[in-house]
Image (cartoon, rainbow, N blue to C red):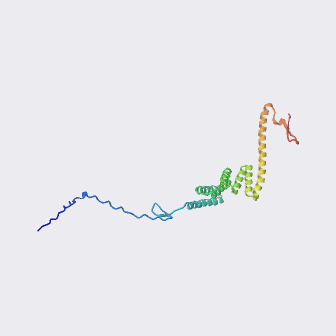
Amino acid sequence: MVVIERAVEPKKEEETSTSHQIPRPPSPVVFPKPSLPEDGCLSEDGRFEDAVTEEELNEKALNQANDAKTEGNRLFGAGQYDEALSKYDLALQIASEITSSEEIQSMCHANRAACFLKLGKYDDAIKECNKTLELNPLYVKALIRRGEAHEKLEHYEEAISDMKKIIELDPSNAQARKNIMRLELLAAEKREKLKEEMIGKLKDMGNNLLGRFGMSLDNFNAVKDPNSGSYSISFQR
């Protein structure tokens, strides 16, 4: 009887030490990404917030500027001109950050001019009117207020110029025409006054000079020729 012997495979050496085993790294935990709404964004605390467009920001700022201007108008009506100035200034600060805010800015500058007129600060009123007209050259109220400030400072020619601009914009403005007539009289009186002051100064200078020779301008007599309009000077003791 033939016995067939099977080959015996060598046994693998049992690993009795775990020091030779390399542990598998843990599988990373994958969290699903939060889905953001198309019209929203994630805030720092993880909440969804609606996205704000630039147009909405401008509208909000414009409302704030209008609120400040309205409060300024209320204070002006109550005779609190310094407080009104502060509100108009606040409105201007807000409006300066808004695109296409020329209208409210021009209104606030014009209202500040009205405050300065009430406070007797006519130079400041003129500056505010100038700013208004830079933003809106057709702002009639700014021309009226600037003309009033010029008149208070006896800048009659400048006031007349403003009244004429008003008539160009509004030919039916009867008050501006009346103001021109009144201002022209005041301007003529001022010119005459300045002429007399100048003649007085020249006379003093002449007397100081002639006094060295024992004379004065009283020793000279000026006679106007009615035909030619020229003067002839005669000396008298």
Can you see residue 206?
A: yes
- Seen in the image, is 53 located left or right of residue 160? left
Q: Nearer the viewer, residue 21 or 165?
A: 21
* Observer-nearest of 166 and 234: 166
Q: Quadrant of the N terminus?
A: bottom left
Q: Residue at x 77, y 46 (%)?
A: 191
Residue occupying the far front of the picture: 2
Front one among 167 and 117: 167
User: Can you say whether 217 is above or below 174 in the image?
Assistant: above
In the image, taking residue 45 as reference, residue 203 lies left or right, namely right
Query: In this view, which residue lies farthest toward the right?
Result: 227
How far across and how far down the image is residue 237, in percent? 85, 33
Residue 80 visible, this orientation = no
Q: Position of residue 131 (x, y in %)?
A: 65, 53
**Residue 43: x percent and y percent?**
47, 61
**Which residue is depicted at the point 73% across and 54% down?**
165
* Residue farthest bottom in this picture: 1
**Which percent across, then down, holds residue 123?**
67, 50
Residue at far left of view: 1
The image quadrant of residue 227 is top right
Number of disc labels? 0
> Where 180 falls versus 29 (above or below)?
above
